[in-house]
């Protein structure tokens, strides 16, 4: 997989992605290489790992990597983005545990990437239910940027109650025509699901 021949490299990655049972064997190589990824290679690595995420061993590796404080921030972000882009039908327990840990974290970049992954994968009701208290806390956390708070609020299940004045202000501000379309949509979605 380490060669200057681009077509050979692509063939290797394609072959590995077709054999999820090889996940355990390629894990050490992936972890080693992720520590050396250049910024210009980030998108490529996200795609590669997303394609490999159907392997239980690789899925477990991604779950461990995103919470590994010894790993570089860029490797952790790549792993979170790979989770978001994966086509997995069933979210692994290691991913749920990792997201819970990251959503309790004060690092807003990791919180945001986790929320994006959760939103992309459209969790089933039981998995989503286990994260609802964290979404509620993040929605009310005034130390985070409005984008992050709105992203968390949009993941809340229908019927929640808007808890305080800061949440109302956030929603009111987000609906202003000068705000981004994504924030206005999220605020509308939150209001549609909330119990008023």
Image (cartoon, grey):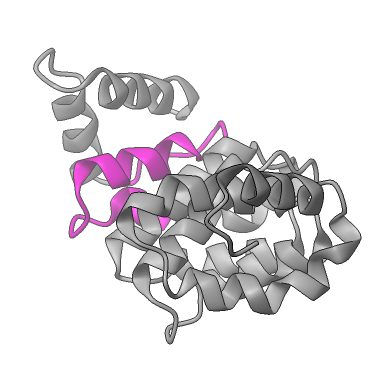
Query: Split into 4 quadrants, where in the image is the N terminus?
Result: bottom right
Instruction: Look at 80% across and 48% down and name the residue there.
Output: 15
Image location (x, y in percent) of residue 6 = 56, 46
Query: From where the camera sits, is residue 4 visible?
Result: yes
Instruction: Look at 61% across and 49% down and name the residue there.
Output: 48
Quarter of image, res 149: top left
Q: Which contiguous range is marked in magenta?
A: 136-163
Q: Is residue 59 above or below residue 178?
A: below
Q: Is residue 184 left or right of residue 36?
A: left
Image location (x, y in percent) of residue 136 = 43, 51
Image location (x, y in percent) of residue 166 = 19, 45
Q: Name the foreground residue: 178 vs 27.
A: 27
Q: Is residue 128 left or right of residue 74?
A: right
Q: Is residue 163 left or right of residue 84?
A: left
Q: Name the foreground residue: 147 vs 1.
A: 1
Which residue extends farthest front?
5
Query: Split into 4 quadrants, where in the image is the C terminus?
Result: top left
Query: From where the camera sits, is residue 128 visible?
Result: no
């Amino acid at each position: 997989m380490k060669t200057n021949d681009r077509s050979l490299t692509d063939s290797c990655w394609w072959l590995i992605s077709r054999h999820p049972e090889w996940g355990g064997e390629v894990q050490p190589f992936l972890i080693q290489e992720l520590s050396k990824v250049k910024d210009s290679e980030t998108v490529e690595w996200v795609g590669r790992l997303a394609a490999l995420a159907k392997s239980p061993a690789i899925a477990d590796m991604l779950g461990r990597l995103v919470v590994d404080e010894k790993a570089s921030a860029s490797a952790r972000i790549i792993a979170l983005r790979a989770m978001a882009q994966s086509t997995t039908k069933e979210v692994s327990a290691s991913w749920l545990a990792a997201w819970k840990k990251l959503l309790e974290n004060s690092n807003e970049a990791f919180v945001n990437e986790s929320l994006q992954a959760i939103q992309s994968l459209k969790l089933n009701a039981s998995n989503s239910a286990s994260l609802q208290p964290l979404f509620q806390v993040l929605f009310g956390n005034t130390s985070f940027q409005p984008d992050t708070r709105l992203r968390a609020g949009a993941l809340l299940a229908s019927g929640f109650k808007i808890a305080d004045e800061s949440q109302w202000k956030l929603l009111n501000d987000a609906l202003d025509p000068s705000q981004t379309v994504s924030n206005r949509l999220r605020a509308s979605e939150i209001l549609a699901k909330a119990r008023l």
